[in-house]
Amino acid sequence: MSQTSPIYESLQQLGITLPPLAVPVAAYVPFVRSGNLLFISGHIAKKDGKPWVGQLGRDVDTATGKAAARAIAIDLMGTLHAAVGDLGKIKRIVKLMSLVNSTPDFTEQHLVTNGASELLAEVFGPEVGAHARSAFGVAQIPMGACVEIDLVVEVQPEA
């Protein structure tokens, strides 16, 4: 598929420009392909190019956390694009895992994570974008970020 596919049209209609591949800040690679599965390393929420810091239930509300998760989904799509060269090669978003930096009494991790899940389903469509998922509340995320998300994606076989 070319970059005029419905996926790229959806991104354009939503006003989304995919970011370039981010350079890892620790000892890992941004993605690993094993057969037809692509494992995308965790991406932290960023705002204005810097970690989007805060803790849900203390200084970040659910709606803001959801916006942070949506921003991560955009970064994840940038990494997917870098990994496969064309988002049309994505056969299925298989699994999304979300870590939400939250207080012990915060219980809306699933609503925060919807920010990423809803955008992926909107961009890729329900057949490709709907996915299995986990959403966890954690005590802290690297650099104090409010949310971190990783993905497992099925891609078309290599030629």
Image: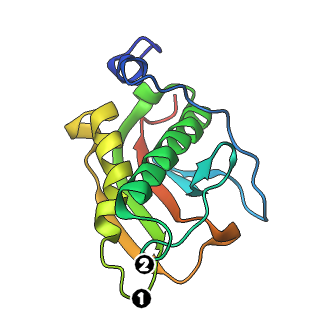
Sooner in the amino-acid sequence: mark 1 or mark 2:
1
Which numbered disc, 1 or 2, marks the residue closer to the eye?
1
**Which of these two is toward me, 41 or 115?**
115
The residue tagged with tag 1: helix, strand or loop?
A: loop
- Quarter holding residue 44: bottom right
* Residue at image location 49% in from the left, 45% down from the top: 71
Query: What residue is rendered at 71% in x and 55% in y?
Result: 29
Q: Residue at x 78, y 64 (%)?
A: 26
Quadrant in which residue 114 is drawn: bottom left
Residue beneath the point at 56% across and 29% down: 18
Assign the N terminus to one quadrant of the image.
top left
Q: Amino acid at mark 1?
A: Pro
When the figure is inspected, residue 38 is found, relative to residue 8, above or below; the finding is: below
Is disc 2 placed on a helix, strand or loop?
A: strand
Q: Which residue is mark 1?
A: 104
Give the side of residue 71 with respect to residue 62, left or right.
right
Choose between 5 and 51: the one closer to the eye.
Answer: 51
Residue farthest along the front direction in this orientation: 59
Locate residue 8, reporting x and y percent.
42, 20
Give the vertical position of 141 relative to 97 (above or below).
below
Q: CA distance from mark 1 to mark 2?
A: 8 Å
| Residue named by callout 2 | 137
Left or right of 19 on screen, residue 71: left
Circles 1 and 2: CB atoms closer than 8 Å: yes
Mark sitting on residue 126: none
- Counting from the top left corner in percent of width and height, residue 129 is at 30, 42
Q: Quadrant of residue 155?
A: top left
Residue furthest left as drawn: 126
Residue 31's spot in the image, x, y percent? 62, 51
Report crowding for label 2: few under 14, some 14 to 19, many 20 or more residues within 10 A (C-alpha): many
Of the residues shown, which amino acid type is indicated by label 2?
Answer: Gly
Question: In the picture provided, is 125 more to the left or to the right than 43?
Answer: left
